[in-house]
Amino acid sequence: MKKWDIVIIIILLILSFSPHIVFYSIMQRDYDILYANISVDGKFVEKYYLTGNNKIYESTISTPVGENIIVVDNQKIYIKEATCKDHLCVHAKPIEKVGQSIICLPHRLQIEIKGLEQNSDIDIKTY
């Protein structure tokens, strides 16, 4: 091994950790408003605001392959029931932090937590 081989290996090691550092900084950021984005086949379906939501809200999401019952409870969201065979999405823990997600692969359903800062220009609607 030559001197430049070691330098290149060190640079590649440092670069390999950069996605982890970026993702961690996004997760640690304080957002004023948290919401869950629900999409089927990559297309937006619904949005549920979690911040300040102390009600229990249940909704059925129909996909071309089946149905999922989603529950928003105490600023967390989870899948209560699904018509898929494996039920992995039903066994997932409730999510509540930015960057967390629940995915039902057979139904192509994705629930992802996102955040907004208070000074954004988006209207807030609570359920």
Image (cartoon, rainbow, N blue to C red):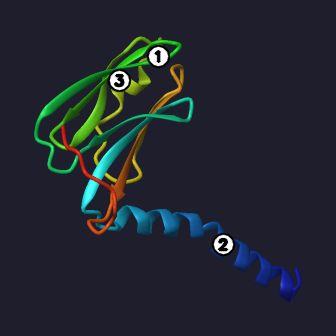
Residue, disc 1 = 86
Tell me: 81 left or right of 72: right
Asked if the residues shown at circle 3 and circle 2 are in contact, with their CB atoms under 8 angstroms apart, the answer is no
Sequence-first disc among 1 and 2: 2
Left or right: 88, with 15 as reference point? left
Q: In the rendered view, would you say 27 is above or below 76?
A: below
Mark sitting on residue 7:
none
Q: Is residue 19 left or right of residue 100?
A: right
Residue 13 drawn at (x, y percent):
67, 72
**Residue carrying label 3:** 90
**Where is residue 106 drawn, in percent x and y?**
53, 20
Q: Is residue 48 above or below residue 117?
A: above
Q: Amino acid at mark 1?
A: Asp
Report the front residue among 61 and 8. Answer: 61
Q: Give residue 93's quadrant in the image.
A: top left
Q: In the rendered structure, which amino acid carries the disc numbered 2?
A: Leu
Question: Residue 65: x, y in percent?
Answer: 52, 13
Tell me the residue at 23%/24% (across/down): 58
Cα separation, mark 3 vs mark 2, equals 36 Å
- Marks 1 and 3 sit apart, C-alpha to C-alpha, by 9 Å
Marks 1/2 in contact by CB < 8 Å: the verdict is: no
Q: Secondary structure at mark 1?
A: loop
Residue 36 coordinates in the image, percent (x, y): 34, 42
Mark 3 neighbour class, 10 Å CA radius: few under 14, some 14 to 19, many 20 or more: many
Quarter location, residue 55: top left
Task: From the image, tell me which residue sits under label 2.
Answer: 15
Q: Helix, strand or loop at disc 2? A: helix
Q: Is residue 117 above or below residue 33?
A: below
Inspect the image, locate mark 3, and give the three-letter code of the amino acid beneath it.
Val
Residue closest to the far left: 54
Quarter in which the N terminus is drawn:
bottom right
Query: Which element is circle 3 on?
Result: helix
